[in-house]
């Protein structure tokens, strides 16, 4: 047997009220199915509203660790500087190329380096490097 949750018990209450509607009609004047349905829906709404209101004992509080965030930012900045420094010789070799063969050789070695690394670290100014190569 499944444990009953608030919505299951509310469904059972509504079903019980609906099934007992014909029995209520003769004893209470003016209590038809509409009155029973209205009563059941208001009970169901109040049951759901109270179960949702007690979801938290207290409001969760997010705390910021600024020292840790600064460490991560500094480490990322250092990684970007290191990656940019490793790319500089390849870009300079492409810039120095005087012939098509030299350019092709330098561009191939640059492409092989990037493929070997798998990616360029986020934050490296790739557009700046590309504009240097185009010039």
Image: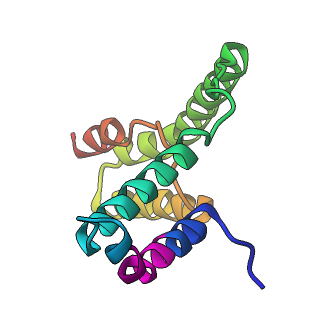
Judge by depth and name the residue closer to the eye, 54 or 24: 24
Q: Residue at x 50, y 37 (%)?
A: 88
The question of residue 101 being in magenta is answered with: no
Q: Main secondary structure of the magenta part?
A: helix
On the picture, is 18 further left or further right than 90? Answer: left
Callout count? 0
Relative image position of residue 51 (x, y in whole percent): 57, 48
Relative image position of residue 1 (x, y in whole percent): 78, 85
Judge by depth and name the residue closer to the eye, 58 or 74: 58
User: Height in image: 40 above or below 84?
Assistant: below
Range covered by the magenta-colored residues:
14-24
Judge by depth and name the residue closer to the eye, 47 or 23: 23
Q: Residue at x 39, y 73 (%)?
A: 24
Relative image position of residue 36 (x, y in whole percent): 34, 67
On the picture, is 12 further left or further right than 31? Answer: right
Q: Quadrant of residue 4?
A: bottom right
Q: In the image as oriented, which residue stretches furthest toward the top?
A: 67
User: Height in image: 115 above or below 51?
Assistant: below
The question of residue 16 being in magenta is answered with: yes
| Image quadrant in which the C terminus is located | top left
Q: Is residue 48 visible?
A: yes
Relative image position of residue 79 (x, y in whole percent): 63, 34
């Amino acid at each position: 047997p499944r444990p009953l949750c608030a919505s299951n018990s509310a469904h059972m209450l509504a079903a019980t009220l609906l099934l007992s509607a014909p029995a209520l009609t003769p004893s209470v004047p003016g209590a038809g199915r509409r009155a029973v349905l209205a009563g059941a829906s208001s009970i169901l709404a109040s049951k759901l509203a109270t179960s949702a209101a007690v979801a938290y004992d207290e409001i969760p509080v997010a705390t910021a660790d600024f020292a840790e965030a600064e460490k991560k930012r500094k480490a990322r900045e250092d990684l970007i500087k290191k990656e940019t420094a490793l790319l500089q010789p390849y870009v300079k070799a492409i810039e120095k190329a005087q012939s098509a063969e030299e350019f092709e050789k330098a561009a191939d070695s640059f492409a092989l380096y990037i493929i070997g690394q798998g990616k360029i670290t986020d934050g490296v100014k790739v557009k700046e490097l590309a504009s240097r190569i185009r010039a």
